[in-house]
Image (spheres, grey):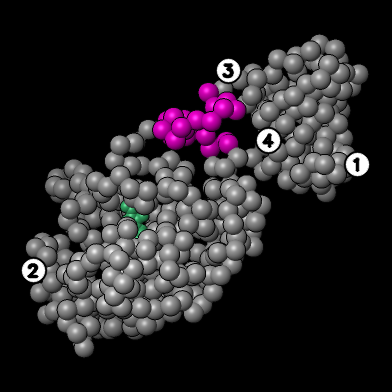
């Protein structure tokens, strides 16, 4: 057979009329006596290759009848326009080269339960919905990086091995670290971002973080990705405005790039189109009132659980920013509100449609004595925090930032029930394989 240029399936429409080669996997096959219809996917899309009885040698035509799902193959033929095809083209195949005949594929056409699919995650990634989700995730990641770059934030990444907790001591994963004793997988890069902000002004880190969460909810992973901007001279209001611009930009960009994928996911884009600044800003106190007047039970001083967040976020058509939570339920590094010492200068952004918290942020305690007090109150090992305290000794300034959970955000944008489908290989309390 004559050679033909290799073309990605997504680019086939531009090659109508030419003979090309595509390389991929057999997604589906249908045969009548005289024609085989091979659905071939190559990672960029799916195209139908039509193999007519007279178009290929008889032995190859017969062999096509036996090709199993996920058989890897190289198909050559002429791209022709076809109004019925989703891509607008199909391939009139004149050559089918089999790379490997797949064994019977465990993911058939029948419905599978989520547990089974998770055990087959390495193969499930090839299915249409996971494929669409990971393409959305890719867009979200690029939108995030582009946003911060445009806003003048420098990417400065944080270490994963750390000497101490930053988000509460109950969710730490410890590892043996040579002769230095215990190290911990980081729960957040924030403390390091604060140091970097004093060097560069505006920075962000974006990497995996770890929480030994014993929760089996649809919002919790033990390993997830967080992006954390941090800026010198930022107040709580600056943090909120940044979060607002940021979410608006990320959602708009994803909608622009991934309409087709959202269709595959049967995600209604309308609620996402409403993600426009300004977002409502309410205080914790106002939120408590709202929860109570909707019949929910909450005492002042308690953190919101999923039911309360769901109820709150469901009453807005766009993300809502809840600020000034009681300091007692928040992290040690948050600055207290000078006009009410019971509350912290913090904000949680709750995504709409009942999704709940996707961003947590705050203005940081910039006073050395106050921060020392917090370290002691929270029974944190002071030696491990000396470097962090130094940031308050040498040119301390007001500053703040936030952390956005990537999987919760992707899950929200894709309309997923559970965050575990928003990451390629989810890590949960009860799952570490594959
Ligand atoms: O609210 P969190 O704990 O905030 C921090 O870690 C701060 N240090 C961030 C900062 O100010 N730089 O976590 C931030 C976000 C949450 O809003 C949520 O989206 C996500 O991280 N998150 C999780 N996502 C998946 N699984 C978990 N177990 C998560 N825990 C938090
Ligand atoms: Mg939080």
Bounds of the magenta segment: 106-127
Residue highlighted by disc 2: 376
> Does the residue at mark 3 contact the one at mark 1 (Cβ under 8 Å)?
no
> Does the residue at mark 2 contact the one at mark 4 (Cβ under 8 Å)?
no
Is 122 in the magenta?
yes
User: From the viewer's perspective, is 279 left or right of 40?
Assistant: left
User: From the viewer's perspective, is 381 left or right of 287?
Assistant: left
Question: Where does the N terminus fall, quadrant-wise?
Answer: top right
> Does the residue at mark 3 contact the one at mark 4 (Cβ under 8 Å)?
no
Viewer-proximal residue among 95 and 213:
213
Residue highlighted by disc 4: 41
- The crowd level at tag 2 (other Cα within 10 Å; few <14, some 14-19, many 20+) is few
Q: Which residue is drawn at 23% across and 83% down?
A: 337
- The crowd level at tag 1 (other Cα within 10 Å; few <14, some 14-19, many 20+) is some
The alpha-carbon separation of the residues under discs 3 and 4 comes to 18 Å
Could you say where residue 324 lies in the image, as x and y percent from the top left?
A: 27, 77
Whether residue 104 can be seen here: yes
- The crowd level at tag 4 (other Cα within 10 Å; few <14, some 14-19, many 20+) is many
């Amino acid at each position: 057979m004559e050679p033909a240029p290799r073309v990605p399936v997504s680019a086939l429409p531009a090659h109508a009329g030419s003979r090309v080669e595509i390389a991929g996997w057999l997604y589906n096959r249908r045969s009548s006596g005289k024609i085989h219809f091979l659905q071939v996917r190559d990672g960029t899309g799916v195209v139908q290759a039509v193999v007519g009885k007279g178009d290929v040698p008889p032995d190859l035509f017969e062999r096509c009848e036996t090709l199993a799902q996920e058989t890897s193959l190289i198909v050559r033929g002429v791209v022709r326009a076809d109004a019925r095809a989703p891509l607008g083209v199909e391939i009139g195949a004149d050559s089918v080269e089999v790379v490997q005949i797949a064994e019977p594929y465990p993911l058939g056409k029948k419905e599978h339960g989520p547990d089974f699919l998770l055990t087959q995650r390495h193969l499930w990634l090839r299915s249409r919905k996971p494929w669409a989700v990971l393409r959305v995730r890719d867009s979200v990641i690029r939108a995030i990086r582009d946003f911060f770059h445009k806003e003048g934030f420098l990417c400065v990444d944080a270490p994963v091995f750390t000497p101490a907790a930053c988000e509460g001591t109950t969710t730490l994963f410890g590892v043996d670290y040579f002769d230095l004793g215990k190290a911990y997988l980081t729960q957040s890069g924030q403390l390091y971002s604060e140091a970097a902000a004093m060097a560069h002004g505006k920075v962000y880190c974006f990497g995996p973080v770890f929480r030994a969460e014993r929760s089996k909810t649809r919002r919790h992973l033990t390993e997830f990705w967080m992006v954390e901007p941090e800026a010198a001279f930022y107040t709580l209001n600056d943090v909120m405005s940044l979060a607002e611009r940021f979410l608006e930009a990320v959602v708009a960009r994803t909608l622009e790039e991934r309409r087709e994928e959202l269709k595959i996911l049967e995600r209604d884009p309308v609620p996402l189109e409403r993600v426009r600044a300004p977002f409502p800003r309410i205080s914790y106190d106002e939120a408590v009132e709202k929860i109570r007047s909707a019949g929910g039970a909450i005492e002042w001083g308690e953190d919101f659980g999923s039911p309360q967040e769901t109820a709150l976020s469901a009453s807005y058509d766009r993300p809502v920013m809840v600020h000034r939570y009681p300091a007692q339920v928040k992290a040690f590094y948050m600055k207290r509100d000078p006009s009410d010492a019971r509350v912290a200068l913090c904000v949680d952004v709750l995504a709409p449609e009942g999704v709940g918290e996707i961003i947590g942020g705050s203005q940081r305690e910039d006073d050395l004595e106050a921060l020392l007090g917090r370290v002691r109150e929270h029974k944190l090992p002071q030696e491990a925090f000396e470097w962090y305290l130094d940031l308050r000794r040498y040119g301390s300034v007001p500053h703040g930032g936030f952390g956005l959970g990537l999987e919760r955000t992707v899950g929200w944008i894709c309309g997923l029930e559970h965050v575990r489908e928003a990451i390629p290989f989810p890590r949960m309390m009860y799952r570490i394989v594959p």
